[in-house]
Image (cartoon, rainbow, N blue to C red):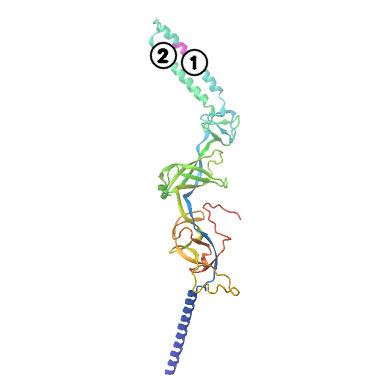
Amino acid sequence: MKLRMTIMLIVVFVLISVIVGWNMVTAAFLKKAAAGGGALPPATVSTTTVHLQDWQDSVGAVGSLRAVRGVDVSTEIAGLVRKVNVVSGADVAPGTLLIELNSEVEQAQANTLAVAVELAQTTLKRDREQLSVQAVSQATIDNDEADLRSKQAQLAQARATLDKKTIVAPFAGRLGISTVARGQYLNAGDKIVSLQAINPIYVDFFLPQQQISRITRKETVTVTTDAWPGREFTGKISAVNSTIDSTTRNIQIEATIANPDRALLPGMYAKVSVQIGGVERYLTLPQAAVTYNPYGASVFLAQPAPAKAGEGAKAGEGAKSESAEPSLVAAQTFVTLGPTRGDQVAVVKGIKEGDMVVTSGQMKLRPGTPLIVNNTVEPRSDPNPKPQEQ
């Protein structure tokens, strides 16, 4: 038993000695590699120089276009269509004749009442002359005046009905497509044609209630729509709703957009960008240059490599000299980020103008890694990126 115990203790001691020795050798090797600085292989990266840029803050939303004034023109009374003056898609001025209904009966009634009014006027005039010689009483004059006013009211009613047989454009705008034909019978309230005033045109969109303090009337907006790729329409905010939607907590905004060529039509889907506040200046970077971590955002700077002891002593040995080592090394620094726009992000703190920042290849870097800069392909840094087809 003593022999077995001795052998076991010897084996355990040997194992512990081997483990401790291996750890010491590994630690010494890592320390030597870190101290030498040349153990880390160089990494190829792209870089950019940090500059100050003008920054106009903006907020985006999805909106819908709406006519400044838009109605479905209809008729107040029923009738048979006698004349059609509607040209689908045409621009019309206020008062332009659109539809004329058959009005022969109403015209005849108006003529009859006009004659009755003339007779009532003649009767009243004659009775007033007879009143001057006491041939009639004042009651007769009163009855004549009442009869004249009644006939005049009936004539005005007939003429109003006659006017309703003619349908005109209530305001200037563009007509829609009409299917009304001559000889068709229209009931009261039947749609004749759509009329839309579209220059200028409204765009309605919604923003979160957190943006209320930043939105004011007359702020500039930019509108884009897939109906007109590559084209931007500008306007200004004309109204902010007085209530907030209690379900979504969003507020409705109305902007007025100039539309002289009638390119925008009511009902179109549009993307809206609202410019907020004044122009500021920020240090900007491509968003691809920033490494996001749970403990904060950071970037890698490309800085000159520190000079080594004894460097230059062998500068004259040209025959056996090796290729020049990278003159830049990576240095990680934490940054405080500001707003973003497109492919860019503003940096509030952590870097300064003129710094060289690594924009790609950060995943293979650690502090002190030698760098080889190759800017043949650089990440996009467009404040207003657009979809690209390959």
Q: For the N terminus, which image quadrant? A: bottom left
In the shown orientation, is residue 131 left or right of residue 309?
left
Is residue 3 visible in the rendered structure shown here?
yes
**Which span of residues is magenta-colored?**
115-124
Residue 128 belongs to magenta span: no
Kindly report the secondary structure that dominates the magenta region of the rendered protein.
Answer: helix
Q: 25 above or below 224?
A: below
Q: Label 1 is placed on what type of residue? A: Ala
**Mark 2 residue element:** helix
Q: 294 above or below 23?
A: above
What residue is shown with label 2? 143
Residue 217 picture location, percent across and down: 43, 42
Q: Residue at x 51, y 38 (%)?
A: 200
Residue 167 picture location, percent across and down: 54, 29
CA separation in Å, label 2 and label 1: 15 Å
Residue 116's disc number: 1
The single residue placed furthest to the front in the displayed view is 316
Neighbours of disc 2 within 10 Å: few (<14), some (14-19), many (20+): few
Residue 331 picture location, percent across and down: 48, 66
Q: For the C terminus, which image quadrant? A: bottom right
Q: Residue at x 42, y 14 (%)?
A: 145
Q: Which residue is drawn at 40% across and 7% down?
A: 131
